[in-house]
Image: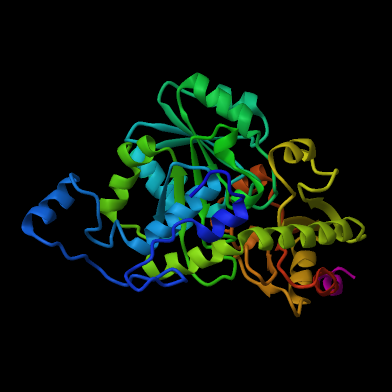
Amino acid sequence: MSDDLEQETLAIHTGIHRSQFNEHSEAMYLTSSFVFESAAQAAARFSGEEPGNIYARFTNPTVTAMEERLAALEGAETCIATSTGMAAILSCIMGLLSSGDHIVASRSLFGATVNLFNNILKRFNIETTYVSATNVGEWETAIKPNTKLLFIETPSNPLTEISDISALSALAKRKGVWLVVDNCFCSPILQKPLELGADIVIHSATKYLDGQGRVLGGAVLGNHELLMDGGVFGFLRTAGPTMSAFNAWVILKGLETLKIRMDAHTAHAMKVARWLESQPNVARIYYPGLPSHPQYELAQKQQKTGGGIVSFEVKGGKEGAWRVIDETRLISITANLGDAKSTLTHPASTTHGRITQEARDSAGITDGLLRVAVGLESPNDIMADLARGLS
């Protein structure tokens, strides 16, 4: 596929490999294994002398099509699809790091990511130091001789803090470590971390890439040598946190509409954010598209828009926040995001409920904080639904 094509065209035409039936819509290959023409071909496939499918734990034509399409959108050489977004993070770290290695990570991370770093990787002697998402000096101070990887979400979940990808990339290169960016909130439509110097991009394809809350999926993207020869694909091939062909097909079709969906999500989110900023019972709002956001200028530079996630603190703490949730009639009360349906979450008791109170305080996640993932409904209806609990 030509590099000259625009993203919305790449999202529709990349990764199409028609079968003998010459189908127009991409085929779904539901098979656990693949047949060889001879013993010699089987041996050549297993040894890597001949390319081709072997077993669906690590290769499948539908999954490959999805990987090619997402890689084209991110501007990556290689994409490795996984069963979930958390499986993508796990595969990245287990493929590249060893016992005794060290990670420097933003303290503003998704709760499950913090639990992975603190409760699972720590058991294998991989330690993590947490620093400010926005203070590059803290990152430099935290890097040790055994540091191998810097890990950020930008915008962060749920406070939409913006990390300076270019500055952290320059630091990572100077120190000889990798920079990994979770690009879930923006998708490649709004932000392309590899172009800003990141080494690896992580996605929870469950979110905007699918776009309708139907299936789970994840992806690790970067250059071929790092991901394929560096160990990430080897981990997936052996351990098997694999994306299913069905889920890959759903996400493949979801990518076709990613550009127009992200345009709508962000336009709606901006309208809702401006409205929330004027509500007397909202103490504070976090949205990168508003000039009031602490990293507004940086967001304007490295993102195309503010995105579809708006977080805000309600007066009255937990009681006030839960009142807003319980008074909704339209918005879905669920922890997922990136759906056509708007969703509303109380992070302190759900997505970040399993981390310590100290960690929540450090990350700025208060009991009054709510996160709304603005969907594709009329923003007027979304605002009316939130207004009941805010009145």
Horizontal and vertical percent position of residue 285: 81, 52
Question: Toward the viewer: 61 or 269?
Answer: 61
Left/right placement of residue 381 relative to residue 340 reads right
Q: Is residue 286 magenta?
A: no
Q: Is residue 114 visible?
A: no
Residue 322 position (above or below residue 155): below
Left/right placement of residue 350 relative to residue 162 reads left
Q: How is the image coloured?
A: rainbow
Residue 146 position (above or below residue 188): above
Q: Which residues are magenta?
A: 386-391
Write the residue at 58% across / 44% down: 4
Write the residue at 61% across / 45% down: 358
Horizontal and vertical percent position of residue 360: 63, 49
Query: How many labels, in total?
Result: 0
Left/right placement of residue 39 relative to residue 68 reads left
- Residue farthest bottom in this picture: 329
Horizontal and vertical percent position of residue 245: 37, 67
